[in-house]
Image (cartoon, rainbow, N blue to C red):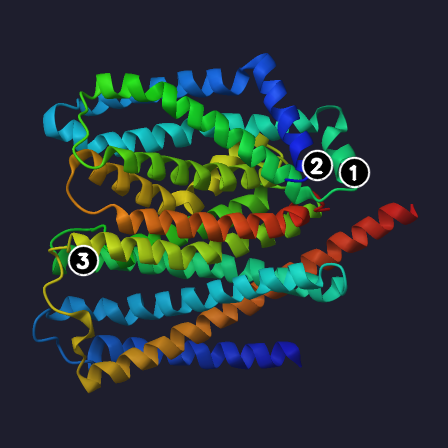
Amino acid sequence: MTSALWTHLVKDLRIEWRSREAINSMLFFALLVVVLFSLAFDPRGAFSQQIAGGVLSVATMFASVSALNQAWAREIRHQVLDAQRMAPTQGSQMFLAKVLANFLFVSIVQLLLAPAFLVFYNLHIQGNAWLLLLVLPLGTWALVANGTFFAALSIRSRNREMLLPLILFPIFMPALLAMVLATGSILTGDGDPGLWIKLLAGYDTIFTTVSLLLFDVVLNAE
Amino acid sequence: MKKLIIGLYALITIALMVWGFYQAIYVAPVDALQGEYYRIIFYHVPSFSAAFTFFSVSFLGSIGFLSFRRSRPEWAQIADAWALAGAEVGVVFCTVGLITGPIWARRAWNMWWTWDARLTTTLVLWLIYVSYLLLRRFVAGPQMQTLAAVLGIFGALDVPIVYMANRWWRTQHPAPVFGGDSSSGMAPAMVHVLLWNMLAWFMWGVLILILRYQVERKQQKFAAQEVQEALNA
């Protein structure tokens, strides 16, 4: 780990530690989505097992959008981003640090949300519960890596906050599908989530690589 | 000269489209299983094959823009115009395909839509390119071309993954709506008609693509001239 990446990471973690803005707002938002879905679909019995994976994934997806926007909006103020562009380090290190920090935040939100989720949906996991420890981080990484990249891209637009979900969600769809189907098959115990875990791993590898390669282009776009 | 060639080309295209329409509606035999309504295939398939070609043009344009952005600005502008024209005309043709599909499915499958691998992939592809066009609207200034090119590359990379994901999804739970295998072949008389229509619609699409490209090039030159005048003033 290089020092530039470390510096960015420590800075982002420190800002979050002092304000707790991202985690608190994401947590409350995700909780709201879970409650709203329960009202909209009335999950009971086997049906709640089937839709729980989808609700968790979609709740995380919606919640993370606001936090990802904030991650870059903070850098825009006082021309911090311009200063960072002039710094003699690679943009990809700043990008990776932001991805790591936001990955941590979203994972914490998921961990805190899990008990509420188990209670509201009366879940009892029938597949291999430990596989969730593989599926959720892989899915979260797909969301956060792409989300951080597209947030940096959309921060240049006129209506910053609006553009991110519009360009992130279509690209994220295959990963969301894999995440939903994998968690669904773990919760209900039927089907093999192996294929979906592989797809998620492949998606993560491809898009993280492309993001790292193209981040400098986005950062210095003019 | 340029205008004459394009005019001639447009005339040939329109003649071919009339010929294709005549072939599709009056010449092609009635399908044994589906009766008359199968004829929509003569519009459905050409639209999609044209759409996929234009999306590839857009992808190549995006790559071209990023490659020549620093070294040859003029080439980069040309590549960007192709990327925009390809995406826009591709979305139009994809929309036509997405509309004709359900009209046919309503009769053939007795339902408008099914979340089958190909349908879902095409819908996601359409969504990706609409988001690409939205990005071009929302971002102001010269950085827009770079950001759009990056999104264009991401979108094109996503398509095979979407396809694989949906194929695996539906292989696990086969869709009941597919009675016969679609690749089981077509009568030669129908294939001929289909090829005529594919040619006609493809040429039509290329015509629109070229016109859209020229409009974009004019717009680029106009914008550059405006900047130059503002600098000189």
State whether discs 2 and 3 lie on one chain: no
| Horizontal side of residue B130 vs A122, given as left or right | right
Q: Tell which tag, 2 or 3, sits nearer the viewer.
A: 2
Q: Mark 2 vs mark 1: same chain?
A: yes
Residue type marked 1: Ala
Q: Residues within 10 Å of mark 2 (few under 14, many from 20)?
A: some
Residue topped by disc 3: B105
Q: Earlier in the sequence, mark 2 or mark 1?
A: 2
Q: Disc 2 vs disc 1: which is toward the camera?
A: 2
- Dots 2, 1 in contact, CB < 8 A: yes
Marks 1 & 3 on one chain: no
- Whether tag 1 and tag 3 are in contact, CB under 8 A, the answer is no
The residue lying furthest to the left in this view is B33
User: In which quadrant is the C terminus of chain B drawn?
Assistant: top right
Secondary structure of the residue carrying tag 3 is helix
Tag 2: amino acid: Ala
Residue that mark 1 sits on: A87
Relative to B93, residue A79 above or below? above
Q: Name which residue lies at 12% across and 57% down.
A: B177
The location of residue A17, given as percent across then percent down, is 57, 16
Residue B122 seen in render: no
Disc 2 marks which residue? A4
Q: Please name the amino acid that badge 3 sits on.
A: Ala
Q: Residue at x 36, y 65 (%)?
A: B48
